[in-house]
Image: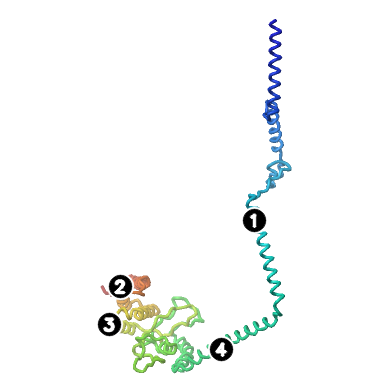
Amino acid sequence: MQQSQSQRERAVSAFQSNSRLQNQKTSGGQGFHSRSNSKKNSFKKKQINSHFNQSDKNSGNPTSLKGKGYRRPKFFQNKTLINNNKRKNNEYRLNNKENVEKLNFSFQNTGPVENEIDDMEDSINRNTVNLTQNNIGGKETREQRFNSNPFGNKYMNMKKEREQLRKYYIKQGLIDDPDKPRRLEDAIPFVGECQDMCPEFERYEREYQKNLDKFEINQEISTDEISYIDHLRAVKRYQRSDAGKEQPLPCDVRPPPILKKTLNYLVNEIIVNYGIEATHSFVRDRTRSIRQDFSLQNIRDKSAVDAHERIARYHILCLHQLCEKEGFSIKQEIEQLFKVLQSLQEFYDEGKEKKYYISQ
């Protein structure tokens, strides 16, 4: 009796389990067997993807890393973006069609264009001719202006004589011959011979080029159109020693006594009578020229020290008096002051070695 009941219970439990499995299959659920099948399938996929060719991996092909025969899917934009781009392209095509139709219609209605092209070519030719005529006219007026200059003859004659004068100085042994290189120890000391505040050649050159300062013009004989130089008040201007520029001659450089005279004139006549602000640009340029003449002659004695000390005081005074004035450059003034002080430091060191008298 007990055995029959246990068999009956087993049969009932088996029937219930079968019915439960069938209900799960009909409802779409996954039972024990379905889970096991999915695991097996995923395991197979992993095994398939894990096999790849070693040569493809070394070759750098990205598809080989996903397995044999596997290709990485391409990147596609969002569908909305694709649709928007298509719509824009269609609109652009329609607009182009309309423009092309308009152009065709305009070309059909217009006559031949050859006459218009010829007219354009003629206008271009006329403009080029006018430009060339204007350039020629500008050159002619420029030449006429310089030829009509009353100072041209004197300046041109002096310019032609410069080469002969250079040969004379080389023959006399006063300057080095640029075509014959020599050592620094054998160089000829340069000595200035100009006895005026401004060399004669520079005076006529600047008068011819109309490059005169208001403090150098002779107001008694000058007119509104022509400015005559005052040979007694002209001062040598500063010129940069460029590479292609000709070497200065002894007649272009002033000796120390004339340099001292020039500095006294700038301080006692120009600054005192016209003021430091009105004469700043003029005096600043002329003091640079004085320092340049000292450097060309390699003069480092007491006269050079006295002149550089006065120039340094002038720059310090300008920095104090003109620092708040419009158009005054403090940076440039400090730059010139530092150059003067640097030269003075070299003069002081050399004076101590050679026991020069240095003013306190």
CA separation in Å, label 1 and label 3: 82 Å
Image mark for residue 272: 3
At label 4, counting other C-alpha atoms closer than 10 Å, the crowd grade (few under 14, some 14-19, many 20 or more) is few
- Marks 3,2: beta carbons within 8 A: no
Q: CA distance from mark 2 to mark 4?
A: 51 Å
Q: Would you name the residue on which mark 2 appears?
A: 316
Which image quarter: residue 54?
top right
Measure the alpha-carbon separation of dots 1 and 2.
73 Å
User: Where is residue 149 drawn, in percent x and y?
Assistant: 45, 93
**The disc labelled 4 sits on which kind of residue?**
Ile
Front of the two marks 1 and 4: 1
Answer left or right for 236 relative to 5. left
Above or below for 308 versus 39: below
* 318 versus 213 height, above or below: above
Residue 19 sits in quarter: top right
Q: Which mark is residue 324?
A: none
**Mark 4 or mark 1, which is nearer the start of the sequence?**
1
Residue nearest the observer in this picture, 235 or 80 = 80
Q: Amino acid at mark 2?
A: Ile
Kind of residue sitting beneath label 3: Val
Q: Nearer the viewer, residue 154 or 216?
A: 216
Q: Residue at x 68, y 48 (%)?
A: 74
Q: Circle 4 sits on which residue?
A: 136
**C-alpha distance separating marks 3 and 2:** 17 Å
Q: Toward the viewer: 12 or 58? A: 12
